[in-house]
Amino acid sequence: MKIALIVNKDKEKAILIAEKISALLTESGAVILTDKPHDELFRDCDAAVTVGGDGTIIHSAKHAAKYSKPMIGVNVGRLGFAAEVEPDNIADLKRILTNNYTIKKRMLLDVTVKRMNGECESFLAVNDATLARGQLSRIIDISVSLDNSPIYTYRADGILFSTPTGSTAYSLSAGGPVIYPEMNCILLTPICPHSLISRSVVFDGEATLTAKVKVNDDTPAILSIDGERNISITPNDLVIIKKSDKVLKLITLYDRNFYQLLNEKLKERKS
């Protein structure tokens, strides 16, 4: 079996743990693929192991979804909401080689920016797409439509469109609800809304949401995809959010209650 090993090389601990994982899996008969562009690694592998934090997983997840390859994360970050394995348990990764695991599928978002001239840019979001003011900390008006029907105009610092997986990320910090990660829905959470009645809304996973910004000067809004990619948005642009045809396949080794795990992680966040 070919295992792609993706490591956050900015963390010395991640490099040391990755070396142990490589030796462990090689001794068990695996072929380890590393030190290649992500696109090549995921194209050629049978499964992937990431070593780092949630950021490493999110970055790798887009490639895993593109090639429909299962992946699992080893947590070397602080919280590791999306990681399955802690450093003390890396020997459990040998179960991948004997297919002794289950797959949990996570919904992703297709985010399309349609310009006034008809040009389109498309992005894949694992956690969320954030539409907010650019360089200046001012409020922004964002009109949202559901399936081409206007539903509400938010006056806020911004809004978040999240997957169920992303409900425990930025959306949670913005006051949004926790959603079971295998559900099929889109979560909209306003960021610091300037209205007492503006609350998070959960839409059906088959919904198509469209957002349009209104600004009072030449400073563009910013669309951020998973905190990795920033795109300038003008009042003439449309931002279209819908469920992606691609899914993220996460390898699960343990039978754990999601809400118990969530409570444990949130306790770690307080410490």
Image (cartoon, grey):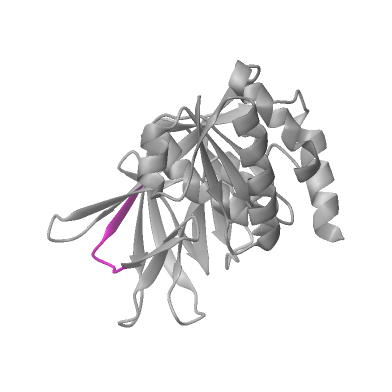
What residue range appears in magenta? 233-240
Place residue 110 in its image quadrant. top left
Decide which of 36, 198 is in the foreground and name it: 36
Q: Does the stretch in magenta take in 237?
A: yes
Which image quadrant is residue 39 in? top left
Residue 70: image location, x then y, percent: 51, 29
Q: Seen in the image, is 14 located left or right of residue 193?
A: right
In the visual, does 185 lie left or right of 223?
right
Q: Residue at x 57, y 68 (%)?
A: 194
Relative height, residue 221 to residue 258 (above, below): below
Residue 191: quadrant of the picture: bottom right
Percent of width and height locating residue 100: 65, 17
Residue 231 in magenta stretch: no
Q: Quadrant of the C terminus?
A: bottom right
Q: Is residue 177 visible?
A: no
Give the residue at x 49% y 79%. Answer: 138
In the figure, 28 relative to 138: above or below? Answer: above
Q: Nearer the viewer, residue 232 or 175?
A: 232
Farthest residue toward the left?
Answer: 117
Residue name at image x 30 percent, y 42 percent: 148
Q: Taking 208 as reference, is 4 left or right?
A: right
Residue 105: image location, x then y, percent: 53, 27
Q: Judge from the rendering whether residue 59 lies leftward or rightward of residue 195; answer left or right.
A: left
Closer to the camera in the image, 86 or 269 = 86
**Furthest residue toward front:** 27
**Picture residue at 64% right of the left edge, 30% below the top:** 27
Q: Position of residue 104 (x, y in %)?
A: 58, 25
